Amino acid sequence: MTDALDPFRLDGKVAVLTGAGSGIGKATAELFASVGASLVLGDINEAAVTAAADAITAAGGKAVGVRCDITQKSDNDALVGRAVADHGRLDVMGNIAGVPHNQMITDVTEEELDRMLAINLKGPFFGVQAALGQMLTQETGGSIINVASSGMDFAAPTLAVYAMTKAAVASLGRTAAIEGAHKRIRVNTIAPGATVTAFTEVSVTDEEGNINADALDGKIKMLTGASPMQMVGEANDQANLILYLASDASRFATGQIWRCNGGAPMVW
């Protein structure tokens, strides 16, 4: 008898995930491993991604951690290349790595703009490019999931650079979905709402790396209040959505933007 959850499993599938050393990327890696995927994990923090992969392996999963600077095309190509070298193909690509940004438009320097475009836009582009290049040579289709943000859905002071990079990522996903459709390659974008990860701590952390606990608590309360559900998300909320999009359960879904955000943009 077929189990209703079988379509959500990733047994025998090979997945590459960026940003897997922490937050949503790490939660996704752990979830993918628990449902049978073989993983190649990338993160600019080599120690963190190696530790994440080692923990998965120790728990009986299959994962390897690789340092990856997503702003470099060669690093994205190498990450996909590692998956193909180790497992012979690529079934899932999760372009999860990214960084937050809060600065008024008039205060943004050209250097800072270039940094954000490199990480939040060029990085996912290079990831999509590398994944499509491999998947188009296969006969088994594939799934690419990009991470944008609900920040692209509303106007708020200091979010200009962040929001525009994430809106561009969503546009990239729609075009890639068209370019890969003839080979059954699906491309979708998730746009997370307020999700408590290291992202949340950035604006309340001083130059020495110390987190202001009161400020963090206040920020979480503010984000909670912005949701009609009066809650904030956790990394696993986004990982569960990414799993759906990576799995055969979503085989007829492509070119879409999926919002797991507690309904927050509805009231902005």
Image (cartoon, grey):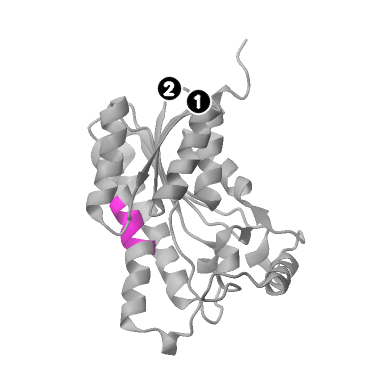
Residue sitting nearer the eye, 99 or 167: 99
Q: Quadrant of the N terminus?
A: top right
Query: Where 263 falls versus 158 (above or below)?
Result: above
Amino acid marked by disc 2: Gly
Query: Where 103 falls versus 77 (above or below)?
Result: below
Residue 254 visible here: no
Magenta residue span: 120-126
Q: Quadrant of the C terminus?
A: bottom right
Which percent across, then down, holds residue 136? Answer: 25, 36
Q: CA distance from mark 1 to mark 2?
A: 7 Å
218 lies left or right of 34? right
Query: Where 34 falls versus 262 (above or below)?
Result: above
Amino acid marked by disc 1: Gly
Which residue is the extreme one toward the top?
A: 1
Residue sitting nearer the eye, 235 or 139: 235
Q: Quadrant of residue 63?
A: top left
Tell me if label 1 and label 2 are in contact, CB under 8 Å: yes
SS assignment for the magenta stretch, majority: helix
